[in-house]
Structures are given as C-alpha cells and as structure tokens.
C-alpha cells in the first residue's frame, strides 16, 4: 500500500516555494476545518474596488507559516534556543490563527453570530482539533493564549510586528496592486533577535520598520478602509440583519442549511458547542454569495434592494469626514427618503446610517516594537527613530461616515 508523501512543496506567488515541515502540519492543512479557508476571501468585498483581491485566508495562513520558518531559522542562528516541540507549536499556532474567520469576516461578527470575534472561534477550533489529534496541539494553544512562559513566542504570533501582519501587508499589496503596502519582510526577519525573552529588532533594521508602519497606515486608508469596501461591508451587514429578522418572523428564505441555522438562532459565545462549531465550519463565502443571488428576487423590498446593491455593485453613497455629521443631516435624508414613499420610518435605517472608523498604525500603549541599540540598550521604536512621522503614526485617526441612497440630494 503506497504512503502519501506529506512533505509537500507549494508554489506561492509572494515567496516562491513553501515547504510543509512535517506530517502533522500536513494533516492539519488537509483537515476540512482548514480547507474551508480556501473558500474564505482574505479581503472580503475589497474585490469590488481592487479586482485582483480574490486571494484567500488559506493563502495567507500558509504564507504566515512560511515566514515563521524563516524567523525560527534566523533566531536559532543567533543563538536563541527553540526546541523541536516549541518550533512545531509556533507553526501550528500561526497556521491556525485565522481559522475562526467566517465568510466576509467582519460583517459576520456583527450579524450571523452576535458579539463573538474570530479569535474566540479560532480558539474553539483549535481545542476541537486538539481533541482530534490526541493533544498534539496543546503547546500551540498555550502559546496562542499567551500562557506559555516564553513571551517572545506570543510576539511572533500576535504583536505589532508579527508574522500575521508581515504576510498580509505584502500579500494584500500584491493582489490589490497598492504598491505602498509592499514591505521587506526578509529584511525585518533578518533583523530579529531575542533579549531577556523579548522579541527585539536590531537598530540597523529601523528604516525597514518605519517603512512597515507607514505601509500599514497606507494600506488601511487605501485598501482595508477604502470607502467603497467599507460601504459594501456595511450593506452586507444590513442584508444579514434583515434576513435574520425575516427568518425569525417565519419567512422562509432560500439559503444553505448552515446559513439557515445561524439565521434562525441567536448565537453568542456561550452557545458555541460542538454542533454549533460544526455548523459554522460549513459556512463560507459561497453560502453568502449564493444567498445574495437568491434574495435579490425576494418579495421583501428592503432585502431585495440591498442584495442587488452588492450583486450589481450599485452601492449606497458614502461620505467621509474628519468631523461628526450633524444629526439634522441624517434627519433630512430620512425625511427625503420617506417623502419619496420608498420606505417607512422604521425601515429607513437600512438605507441611511452613520458611524466611524479608526486607524492607528502604531499603538504606544500596547506591547511596543523593541529596538536593540548598538550599546545593547532597548528602546521603543518611536523613541529610537529620527522619523517624526512615527510619532504621528502612533496617534489614532478617526473618520466619520454617512451612507445614503445616491438619488437623495446631498445637503
């Protein structure tokens, strides 16, 4: 009987060849929970702005594992002791860090499930996989939760300069064509070291870190928080809210069984038993897109209109401002919409709404990016840098938005 070769090599457009380091990692990648990530878009509805942005979370997770391999190689070369078990735990933790993402992730976190973030669901998946794999993920889960005694390992997985950010900036920049997001991850990894159990970057890599932080800021405004992507995601949230409302009133909407399950039930963190997790594991982008295509023909005018907006990319108008929008502006738009006899006062909030977005490229109050200076002292990157821009990057920038149908007059 022939044995499957589990030490595969994959071709990645960003890094070239990626190797799967051992049979356990191969088996995790082959698991249906992980294969689902092939059907979860990395950038949600951003393809409505950047047609190339169709890459998946599967792509991203493998990329993160690849650069984790590079980071471990560099750290060991510099004398940092990392045992084979710790190495494997780092691979597993970074590979599975996004496994809890739902379809069009951020829209899901506010509609299909209630107040449950993807990190919490990732942990539930890891626990379930750990049971399936006879406890072989225990150390990875400890590292992922920050319960392991070697602090730098968590920093490699989740910090302001982790493998996750390094991959998604480079990858998303490539697939969107937003060149400003391209970073030199090889240089950043070569500059890594560990001092007193803390991840540091050598001072000679400071310009690469400045470029990384600037790239992150530009990618947020140009891609992740691009106003068209933002309004599309907000409309999708409204679609799911409306569909859930109708389903719970007894209206039968055509959709897949896993999606129907979440439409019918209010699911919060404490409701996530094995059955709910299995239902969630069957949800992907195709369930949502299939539902949008069906629901655009529904009798419910609100659901139908909202679905057509996304399917045909004929979205609501969105205005951004650094100042809050006056309450009177919203009231006037709602009055105009009601006058046209299109919706009732109760339903106007599906088409006219406001909110805010925030971007902070570097958070000084969180775990800082540590710079190892030539005299062996350690300093926060903002203090070590001669770039005044970095101080500006550590200030949060808030923008306010208002969304409304295009045919209404702007005030």
Image: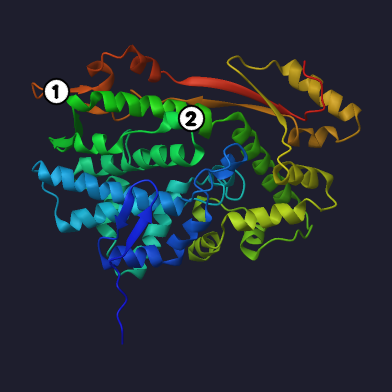
Depth order, front residue of 103/328: 103
Q: In the structure shown, which secondary structural element does the residue marked by tag 2 occupy? A: helix
Q: In the structure shown, which secondary structural element does the residue marked by tag 1 occupy? A: loop
- Alpha carbon distance from label 2 to label 1: 30 Å
| 289 relative to 282 in the view: left or right | right
Depth order, front residue of 365/84: 84
The mark that comes first in sequence, 2 or 1, is 2
Quarter location, residue 386? top left
216 to 328, vertically: above or below:
below
Evaluate whether residue 99 shows in this view.
no
Quarter location, residue 313? top right
Looking at the image, which residue is at 34% across and 64% down?
A: 130
Evaluate whether residue 243 shows in this view.
yes
x and y, in percent, of residue 241 in the image? 69, 45
Q: Report the quarter where the C terminus lies.
A: top right
Which residue is disc 2 drawn over? 220
Which residue is disc 1 drawn over? 373
Q: Residues within 10 Å of mark 2 (few under 14, many from 20)?
A: some
Q: Residues within 10 Å of mark 1 (few under 14, many from 20)?
A: some
| 257 relative to 75 in the view: left or right | right
x and y, in percent, of residue 276 in the image? 53, 61
Residue furthest toward the bottom? 1
| Labels 2 and 1 touching (C-beta < 8 A) | no
Q: Report the quarter where the N terminus lies.
A: bottom left
Residue 235: numbered disc? none
């Amino acid at each position: 009987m022939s044995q499957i070769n589990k030490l595969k090599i994959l071709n990645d457009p960003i890094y070239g060849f990626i190797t799967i380091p051992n049979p356990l990692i191969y088996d995790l990648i082959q698991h249906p929970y992980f294969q689902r990530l092939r059907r979860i878009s990395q950038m949600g509805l951003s393809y409505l702005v950047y047609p190339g942005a169709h890459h998946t979370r599967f792509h991203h997770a493998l990329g993160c594992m690849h650069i984790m391999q590079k980071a471990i190689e560099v750290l060991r070369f510099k004398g940092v002791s990392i045992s084979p078990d710790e190495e494997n735990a780092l691979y597993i933790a970074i590979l599975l860090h996004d496994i809890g993402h739902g379809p069009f992730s951020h829209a899901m976190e506010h509609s299909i499930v209630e107040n449950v973030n993807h990190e919490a669901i990732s942990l539930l998946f890891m626990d379930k996989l750990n049971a399936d794999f006879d406890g072989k993920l225990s150390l990875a889960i400890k590292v992922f939760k920050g319960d392991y005694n070697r602090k730098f390992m968590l920093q490699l997985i989740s910090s302001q300069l982790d493998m996750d950010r390094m991959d998604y900036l480079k990858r998303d920049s490539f697939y969107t064509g937003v060149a400003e997001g391209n970073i030199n991850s090889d240089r950043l990894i070569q500059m890594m070291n560990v001092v007193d159990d803390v991840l540091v970057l050598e001072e000679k890599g400071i310009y690469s870190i400045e470029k990384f932080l600037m790239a992150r800021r530009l990618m947020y405004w140009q891609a992740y928080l691009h106003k068209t992507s933002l309004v599309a995601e907000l409309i999708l949230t409204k679609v799911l809210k409306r569909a859930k409302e109708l389903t719970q009133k007894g209206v039968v909407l055509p959709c897949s069984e896993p999606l129907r399950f979440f439409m019918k039930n209010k699911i919060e963190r404490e409701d996530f038993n094995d059955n709910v997790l299995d239902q969630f594991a069957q949800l992907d982008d195709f369930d949502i897109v299939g539902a949008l295509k069906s629901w655009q023909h529904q009798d419910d005018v609100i659901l139908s209109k909202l679905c057509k907006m996304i399917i045909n990319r004929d979205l609501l108008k969105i205005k951004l401002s650094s100042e809050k929008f006056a309450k009177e502006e919203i009231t006037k738009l709602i009055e105009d919409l009601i006058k046209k006899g299109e919706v009732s006062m109760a339903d106007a909030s599906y088409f006219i709404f406001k909110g805010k977005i925030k971007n902070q490229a570097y958070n000084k109050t969180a775990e800082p990016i540590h710079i190892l200076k030539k005299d062996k002292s350690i300093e926060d990157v903002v203090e070590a840098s001669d770039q005044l821009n970095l101080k500006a990057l550590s200030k949060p920038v808030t923008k306010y938005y208002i969304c409304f149908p295009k045919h209404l007059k702007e005030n």
